[in-house]
Image (spheres, rainbow, N blue to C red):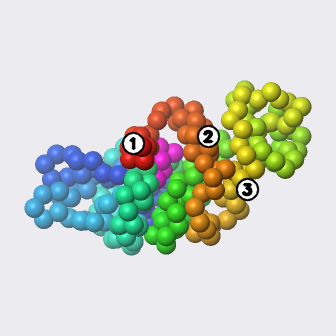
Amino acid sequence: MPLLSSDALVLRTYKVGETSKVVVLLTRERGKVRAVAKGARGGRPRYQSALEPLSEVRVGLYGRQGADLLRLGPCELLRSAFRAGERGLETALNLSYFAELLDAFAQEGEAEDDVYRLALAVVRAAEGGTDSVVLARYLEAWLLRLHGVYPPLDHCAGCGAPLGAGPLDYDARAHGFVCSSCRPASGPLLLEGARRFLIEVFRKAPAAIEGTIPEDAQPLEAFHEMLIGRHLERTLRSLRVLKAAQA
Ligand SMILES: [Zn+2]
């Protein structure tokens, strides 16, 4: 009997020994888990495309309760992210970024069903053709919110007063958006279009967001990067690659 049977998303793999890989999985049952996939490399690799990043799989994991590294048993491919990646370089790079972002945020050994459902919805929306830049901002906003980092859009972080319609003024000391009485704020100032986009993000499923990112909402990229950098205390490698490709 496996120690754990679970649906999971593959986040990444790395080589170990001559013929094996370690696979980092986001499991539905137990959050982030590492497992050795024996025979995953070499002339006749086991598992094949099931271990590609963001593949949705059903796995059996063996090992001791509480062990840092488990052993991958059966691994059935339920859905591959490959088709989404074929939409073009930007989508492919964004998918790598999504996997790294999920890896950075996910807690080891701790089930977070809402994070798991978010990840699945974003990967499926990418496959369905939702714009990958929209999905990047969506995934960032929700991961930050689910980890208690995204500032509320509806009240002032300084005094608690409701925030009226209009732009959102961020203040780093207050860790949130502030009202006119609590200004001056450190910035950035997010325009009305960014606010409308965020409201849509927090209300809708990712596949329901149509079109590309509005011009006014583009500063959200730098804003999210700042929030993520502060939360994780590092910059993600795939984000740097993505930016280099856009330059
Ligand atoms: Zn205030």
The answer to which quarter of the image holds residue 247 is top left
**SS for dot 2:** helix
Relative to 43, is 160 above or below? above
Contact flag, marks 1 and 3 (Cβ < 8 Å): no
Badge 1: residue crowd in 10 Å (few <14, some 14–19, many ≥20) = few
Q: Nearer the viewer, residue 67 or 186?
A: 186
Res. 104 in view: yes
Instruction: Report, in whole angstroms, how far the alpha carbon at label 1 lies from the one at label 3.
Output: 29 Å
- 154 vs 8, nearest the viewer: 154
Q: Decide whether the magenta segment is chiefly helix, strand or loop.
A: helix
25 sits left or right of 119 in the view: left
> In the rendered structure, which amino acid carries the disc numbered 2?
Phe
**What residue is shown with label 2?**
223
Which residue is tagged 1?
244
For image coordinates 41% across by 40% down, the residue present is 240
Amino acid at pointer 3: Arg
Q: Amino acid at mark 1?
A: Ala
Check disc 3 and report the residue beneath it: 196
Distance of label 1 from label 2 (alpha carbons) = 18 Å
Residue 209: % across, % down: 62, 66
Q: Is residue 28 left or right of residue 160?
A: left
Q: Which is more N-terminal, label 3 or label 2?
A: 3
Quarter of the image with the N terminus is bottom left
- Residue 47, position as x, y percentages in the image: 25, 65
Residue 195 horizontal side relative to residue 230, left or right: right
Magenta residues span 98-105
Quick check: can you spot residue 152? no
Residue 139 screen position, x and y as percent: 56, 54
